[in-house]
Amino acid sequence: IPSVIFTEASLQKPQEIPADPFTAFTGASPQAVKVGGHCLVRGVIGKRQGVDGQSYGTRFEVRLPTTWNDMFLFQGGGAVDGFLAPAVGTIPCRNSTAAPGLLRGYAVVSMDGGHPSPDPAFGVDQAARIDFAYASIGKVTSVSKQVIAKFYGAAPKKSVFMGCSNGGREALIAAQRYPLEFDGIVAGSPGFRLSAANIAQAWDTRQYMSIAPKDEAGHPILSRAFSQQDLNIVAKAVLAACDARDGIEDGVINAWQQCRFDPKVLSCQGDKTDSCLTAGQVQAMSRAFAGPESSDGEKLYSDWPYDTGVAGADWRMWKLGNSPTSQSDANNIVLGARSLQYYFMTPPAPNFDPLKFDFDKDPARVADTAKLNDATGTYLASFAAHGGKLLLFQGLFSPASLPTVESCSCFRDFPIQSSQPTIWCAGTSKSSRSQAAAIWKRLAVSCACS
């Protein structure tokens, strides 16, 4: 196959494949997978040297089961990619008990998005930006289908793309830019507008840094902006205010659209205690959850729904981190800041301080990358005409700058010509699973947010 260097092709015995260490980015559960005999093919597409002297090219891995179900599954990535996950077709939904695709007979492929490490520094290379944004999806799809046809002597009868977070964005890109390649697409917690989400990360960090206690040198310690007890009382108050709005008090907030919570109810009336929040904490949380805006009030991204997930480990890891020092380990800093500097800003600005982001002027600096990267296309006539099905699911409290409000608003105006689409945005009812199954069978687009 032109432009492809195959690095491995081997028959694999039944074995246990270790858990993917990057499941925190892909949304899958970090579990080892026992698989049967299969053929393993690895390679790299378009290997080259970048403008920064680094080696680039899209690495991929295809696993072809001995007993094939005649279907092909593209396994999406996560975060900024840069890693090659085992192509076993893990379900990109934490705690899912469903069997991975490889065990169900799918030929599965995974890829690294066109760069060799999960570091946004690849953004200095123009071609690497294009590969990560969308091109690697098309390249790997084409090569994978050729490998499948060569191995089995037949092309797949059905092709499916499944991913979460950035993998969910990749899934939507597949529908929008490669509409004839896939019959079914599952997009979980997709980062529709990662460019704007990155601005939101800078906004959140600004709010929480403003109230973080400082070390002896005067540097803020982000992880201490809120103690775990602070977040616990927020979660408890949100649950008390909103749990029953879906008709059932069961510890789960499903009617998130009707949840009206204001952190002011937790304001300390005197000194700070474990049962209240300071005025600064209330303001910082309120501003962060309202979403980024310019000085004249123009919204730059979505707001966030209040949920008990605010007390979870994932929320803390993304927003605040756990570092006891001013050297933050929060994902919004480690991944978000470097992504802004190297990938989202054009040209790249490695020395830019995200804490000095100007929300009036600097959003224009991410516009070029947004055109390449963001999965905002709404015209899916060709995808629908060939029978394509698109399922969108969204966890209520995805902490990685992918708000439920964003997901459930993005698909309301899809002009699909071949049929009149119905957009299903659930969350107000806990008896919607049967409805979801029916919609999947008959509609071009299904949006499930619960």
Image: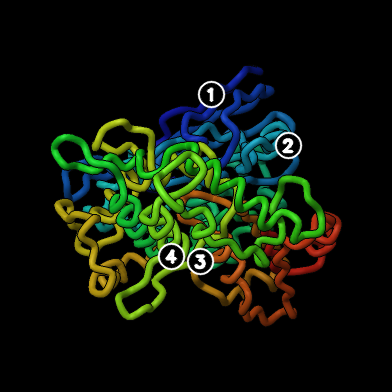
Q: Report if the CB atoms under discs 4 and 3 are less than 8 Å apart.
A: no
Q: Which numbered mark, 4 or 1, is in the foreground of this view?
A: 4
Which comes before the other along the chain, label 4 or label 2? 2
Badge 4 local density, few (<14 within 10 Å), some, or many (20+)? many
Which comes before the other along the chain, label 4 or label 1? 1
The amino acid type of the residue labelled 3 equals Arg
Q: CA distance from mark 2 to mark 1?
A: 27 Å
Q: Is residue 338 above or below residue 370?
A: above
Which comes before the other along the chain, label 3 or label 1? 1
Q: CA distance from mark 3 to mark 1?
A: 32 Å
Q: Is residue 180 left or right of residue 295?
A: right
Which comes before the other along the chain, label 2 or label 1? 1
The amino acid type of the residue labelled 4 equals Gly
Q: Position of residue 300 (x, y in %)?
A: 39, 71
Q: Please tell me the numbered disc located at residue 291.
A: 4
Q: Which numbered mark, 4 or 2, is in the foreground of this view?
A: 4
Q: Please tell me the numbered disc located at residue 98.
A: 2
The amino acid type of the residue labelled 1 equals Ser
Q: In this figure, which residue is indicated by the disc labeled 3?
A: 177
Counting labels gives 4
Say which residue appears at 64% left-offset and 69% top-offset. Answer: 383
Say which residue appears at 50% left-offset and 43% top-offset. Answer: 231
Place residue 372 in its image quadrant. Answer: bottom left
Q: Is residue 348 left or right of residue 146?
A: left
Q: Please tell me the numbered disc located at residue 10.
A: 1
Q: Secondary structure at mark 2?
A: loop
Q: Which numbered mark, 2 or 3, is in the foreground of this view?
A: 2
Q: Is residue 397 above or below residue 172?
A: above
Badge 1 local density, few (<14 within 10 Å), some, or many (20+)? few
Q: Report if the CB atoms under discs 3 and 1 are less than 8 Å apart.
A: no
Give whichever of 348, 324 is nearer the camera: 324
